[in-house]
Amino acid sequence: MRSSLKTTTIATLALVLLSGAAFAADHHDVGRDSDKGAYTGDYNQGIFGEDDMTTPAMPVYRVPVHMASSRLDRVLDELNVDNHRITADREQGKLTAANYRKLEREDGAVRSEALKTAAAHNGMLPARSYARLQGDVRHLDRDIARMA
């Protein structure tokens, strides 16, 4: 009795090990089709070259952070010039700390409004918003000149 149980157990283990090795050799044969598969960087092929992948990999689309817009670029460039002017006036002692903070807040408010408006309109500034933002930039310029 003991002998037949032992024989059946050994035969079952041998069968499991051999079938597992055959399965692994079928899917991981490195010498065959070495120009396809995950080992060469062809990720659209799937994990292995012969996995019969039916669904192709989908490309990933990312939303750009900043789309090129001549109006938006113009407003942001003018705000950068104003920001440099504010910093230079502060370093030269022409602006008090309170005036410097006020001008920085105003500059930040105009900048965030421009970016928020552009984000709402697919990266572009409509004509009305652009005119309003240009007015805000001119007002900031006058404030800088007046406070300095």
Image (cartoon, rainbow, N blue to C red):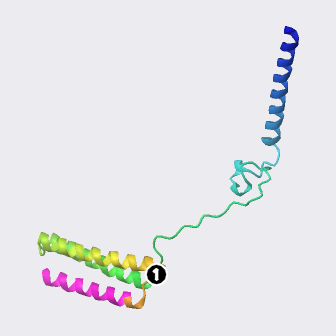
Say left or right for 94 vs 71.
left
Could you say which quadrant of the image residue 110 lies in? bottom left
Residue at image x 84%, y 8%?
A: 2
Could you say which quadrant of the image residue 59 lies in? bottom right
Q: Is residue 41 magenta?
A: no
Could you say which quadrant of the image residue 115 lies in? bottom left
In this view, the residue farthest toward the top is 2
**Depth check, front residue: 73 or 135:** 135
Q: Residue flagged by tag 1: what amino acid is it?
A: His
Above or below, comparing residue 6 to residue 45 in the picture: above
Q: Is residue 132 magenta?
A: yes
Say left or right for 61 vs 90.
right
Instruction: Give the image location of residue 16, x and y in percent.
Output: 81, 28
Quadrant for the N terminus in the image:
top right
Say left or right for 132 vs 15.
left
Residue at image x 14%, y 74%?
A: 99
Most common SS among magenta residues:
helix
**Depth check, front residue: 43 or 60:** 60
Instruction: Give the image location of residue 37, x and y in percent.
Output: 74, 51
Quadrant for the C terminus in the image:
bottom left
Instruction: Give the image location of residue 143, x and y in percent.
Output: 18, 83
Q: Secondary structure at mark 1?
A: loop
Residue at image x 77%, y 58%?
A: 54
How many marks are shown on the rendered structure? 1
Residue ID for mark 1: 121
In this view, the residue farthest toward the front is 1
Q: Which residues are magenta?
A: 129-148
Say left or right for 63 vs 7.
left
Above or below, comparing residue 144 to residue 6 in the picture: below
